[in-house]
Each structure stands twice: as C-alpha cells, then as structure tokens.
Amino acid sequence: MVLTVTGLLGTATGAAYADDPKPPTKGAPAPADDSDAQRLDDVRKKIDALYRKAEQATEAYNAAKEQVELQQKEIVKLARTIDATQRRRTTLKRQVGALASAQYRGGGLPAEAKLMLAANPEGFLDNALLARKGQLAAKRLISQLTKIQGDLESYSHSATDRWERLEANRKKKENAQRDIKKKIDAAKELESRLAAKEKDRLKKLEDEQAFKQQQKWLDSGILDEISNTASAPGKKAISYATAQIGKDYVWGAEGPDTFDCSGLTLRAWEHGGRTIPRTSQEQWRQLPHVALKDMRPGDLIIYFTDASHVGMYLGNGAIVHAPRPGRQVTITGAGTMPILGVVRPDGDARHDDAAH
C-alpha cells in the first residue's frame, strides 16, 4: 500500500517513473517549450533553496530560544537567592542592633572594665568566659553581615549580567524568527505568482526530482540490508504519524491539527511512550544513533548536514514526514533527501558513527 499511495518510492529494479511522457493525443495542448520548462525548474530550485534556508535559520532560533528559557530559570533562581540573602541580612542587622543597645544600656563600658568592677570576685572567671563568648558572637555577626553585603553585591552584578545576556538572546531569537518568516514568505510569493496549471507542473517537477533521488538510493542496494521490524513502541509511533497524513505543515507547530517536521516526530513518539527532544537538531544530538543498515520502522531519519529535517521510517524504503510550508504530512521515499543518519528513540544510549 505504501508503494502505491505515493508514486515516489521507486523500485529496487530501476523501473521507469509512473508518469513517463507519452505522445500527445489529438486535440491535447502542446507541451511547454524548453525555455518555459527551464524557467519553472529554476523557480522550483529557488523555492527549495528558500525553504532550506528557513530550516537552517530554525537552528539559530532554537538555540536562542533554549538560551532564553535557561537564563529565565537562572534569573528566577537568582532572584530567590537575593530575597533569602536580604532576609538574612535584615536578621543579622537586628541582632547587631540588639548587641549595640545592650552595650548602651550597660553604660558603654567595655566588658573588661565591668569585670574589674564586679562586686563578686568569685564569679570573675565565669563572667570573663561569658564576656569572651559575647565578643566572639559579636565579631561573628559583623563578619557574617559583611559577607552577606558582599554576596548581595555579587548577586546584583550577576543578575544584571544575566539580564543583559537574556535580552541579547531574545533579540537573536526574534531576528532568527523574522529571518525564517522572511524566507518562507519569499518562497510563498514566488509560488503565488504561478498560474494554477504551473503550480500543478511545479508539484510534478518536485515529485520527479524526489523520485530520481529515491531511485538512486534504492539502486545502491540499501534495502537488501534493511529487514528489521518495528518495536512495540515504534508501531504505536508509526500509527500516530501515519494518522496525521493530509494535515498541513506549519512552522513551529506540534499538532494536533498542524505540524512541522520535528513536531510530528515528537508527538508520534510521545504516543509511543517516549519523550524525545523537540527539534531535529536535538533529536540528532541526543538520541541513540544506529547504522543505516540496522534501521527499523519507527526510527527517525535525520536529513542534511545541519540536521534540519527529520522523517519517520516506515519500512519498504518509505518515510512519513511533514515536508514544508504549503505541503501536507505525507509518505515519500526515504532517499529523496541527503541522509545525515538515523536515530532510535527507544534504543540503547550508544552512538554509532556508521550511521553517517
């Protein structure tokens, strides 16, 4: 069924594309000339390049977003520390004030003078010991108060520095988001200029290019080495992902009605009982890698050298993925894009360089 629905998966024996040109029938419109076909192919390449750049800008956005969230947590933690330190300083000031008041009430005489004037010589040693303890307590209080004051100044400087870094990363995040929107809007603008018939031809060009890439991948004999079956959690993840077919791609979306590429894999594996990182870059960095020949249905295939795209392997050389804005969640060939490697959300924590 998978091979039938897509028409893009190719065949391991190198069969011709299903939509091979046929001689035009009588009364049919003449095929477009070479220059028109070249123009449309140039448009396809420009649109592809813009969407690729938008995916690349997503990494900068995600990195800045992660830093913003981390710094916000650090600032909250620091604010709590400052509040506790200020309360401790207030308590120490009160204790130091109480000592000063007690000394004032005692006439301001040093403890040693009071001892010399004591009416009870037998209690002199006891009083000396108590006086010594009082002096040490006062010194400790003053030392603690001095340290607390220093800590507060240090925390204040740290808070200022973290706020500045937070604002810098917020600006990076906003700039990256604007950059992504600008590229997506430019791609949509290019596509919107096309007539309805040209849009259909553009889609066909995309499919033909995908087919060629898939066929090349299959011709390498890769499927001869891949024969594993999905795990139980993997089957649940596949069931969820394939149930989303036909839903629109929206950048940054995590479902349930729209998805981007990693939003789809995130929710699918959540359905499979596993929590995985949000972005394709972090899925590549954090999840266990497996060799391509050891791939099994449910594994995630990471694409492009910057790990900017991800799809879920279904078996039979196919993936389900959310392709790009203007397209829907669909099934296509696993070899239609340059493969960086494969990760396994429910695998052992090991890194296999053969996945490259």
Image (cartoon, rainbow, N blue to C red):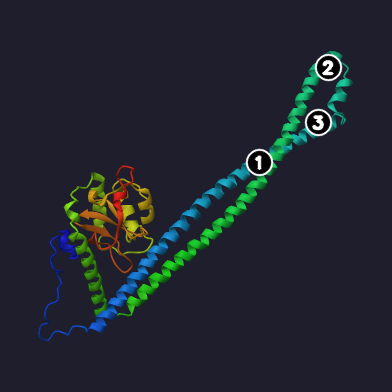
Q: Secondary structure at mark 3?
A: helix
Mark 3 or mark 1, which is nearer the start of the sequence? 1
Q: Residue at x 56, y 56 (%)?
A: 165
Q: Position of residue 22 (x, y in %)?
A: 12, 77
Q: Secondary structure at mark 2?
A: helix
Residue 43 lies in quadrant: bottom left
Mark 3 or mark 2, which is nearer the start of the sequence? 3
Q: Position of residue 139 (x, y in %)?
A: 75, 32
Q: Residue at x 23, y 48 (%)?
A: 294
How crowded is the residue under tag 2: few (<14 C-alpha within 10 Å), some, or many (20+)?
Answer: some
Q: Which residue is mark 2?
A: 124
Question: In the image, is residue 134 above or below residue 228?
Answer: above
Q: Secondary structure at mark 1?
A: helix
Q: Which residue is mark 1?
A: 87
Q: Which residue is mark 3?
A: 102
Left or right, 11 with respect to 276, comes to left
Q: Amino acid at mark 1?
A: Arg
Left or right, 61 with respect to 163, comes to left
Q: Amino acid at mark 2?
A: Phe
How crowded is the residue under tag 3: few (<14 C-alpha within 10 Å), some, or many (20+)?
Answer: few
Left or right, 152 with respect to 133, comes to left
Q: Amino acid at mark 3?
A: Ala
CB of mark 2 within 8 Å of CB of mark 3?
Answer: no
Distance between mark 2 and mark 3 Cα atoms: 20 Å
- Name the front one of labels 1 and 2: 2
How crowded is the residue under tag 1: few (<14 C-alpha within 10 Å), some, or many (20+)?
Answer: few
- Name the front one of labels 2 and 3: 2
Residue 325 lies in quadrant: bottom left
